[in-house]
Amino acid sequence: PAIEANIRALGFRLADIRYLVNSHEHYDHIGGLARLQHDTGATVVAREPAATALERGSNDETDPQSGILEGFPAVAHVRRIADGESVTLGDLRLTAHATAGHTAGSTSWTWNACEGETCHTLVYADSLTAVSRDSYRFSDHDDVVAAFRAAFETVAGLPCDILMTPHPGASGLLARIGPSATEALVDAGACKRYAESAATRLGARLARERGQATP
């Protein structure tokens, strides 16, 4: 209800929405997606395996946070999209980028937006945080670590004028918007720093796990 109220407050009708895209398959990010799909009639778009998780209403058992996450209302139907594919509506083209690690289906999105003759590339970069249940060790899952490192490289290499993230604080978004902004909204180095910070945190997590390894 809160999301729908905000959409209306911006002057849009729910019926105006044609597509719903998501970042990753965790309840705190997609818990309202089934309701939004029902109320708007929009097409939900996601990469695999996020698409299957959305339709199932629960996370995959391979998720590092499996076992500590709530389920969510299942989405009736999800259109599958591959890495590098785009969703187009009028002049707007959203391009999906596989940035797995936080979840296997983690997806970042890029698009161009213009105001007058000034155009910028916007990046909605998914979480790059190595978070897990207490018993999970990333050092035991080379495939997940490799996925993270590929995601860091992808995000760092994106054309990036304006960075946004699922948790605004991760990209300092709230300090860059509105009349009380203290930092510039446009920052071509933001994506690279975001990826580098995540890589540093993953390295620290792996080092901590190695230090805790039993002889």
Image (spheres, grey):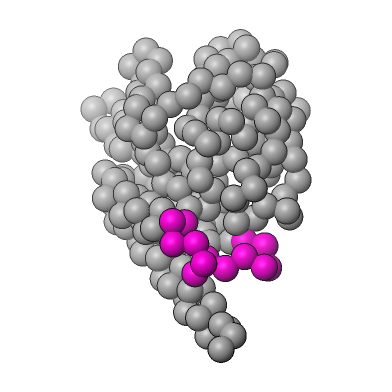
Q: Is residue 168 visible?
A: no
**In the image, is residue 66 above or below residue 19?**
below
Q: Is residue 131 visible?
A: yes
**Between residues 64 and 27, which one lies in front from this camera angle?**
64
Quadrant occupied by the C terminus: bottom right
Q: Magenta stretch: residue 134 in it?
A: yes
| Residue 194 in the image, given as x and y percentages of width and height | 40, 58
| Residue 187 in the image, given as x and y percentages of width and height | 32, 52
**In the image, is residue 15 above or below residue 28?**
above
Image position of 71 (left or right of 124):
right
| Residue 169 in the image, given as x and y percentages of width and height | 55, 56
**In the image, is residue 10 above or below residue 13?**
below
Q: Residue at x 38, y 18 (%)?
A: 88
Q: Kindly give the residue lying farthest to the left in the view shown.
A: 117
Image position of 83 (left or right of 8):
left
Segment tinted magenta in the rendering:
132-144
**Quarter of the view holding residue 89:** top left
| Residue 195 in the image, given as x and y percentages of width and height | 38, 59
Q: Residue at x 62, y 43 (%)?
A: 60
Q: Residue at x 73, y 53 (%)?
A: 67
**In the image, is residue 114 above or below residue 38?**
below
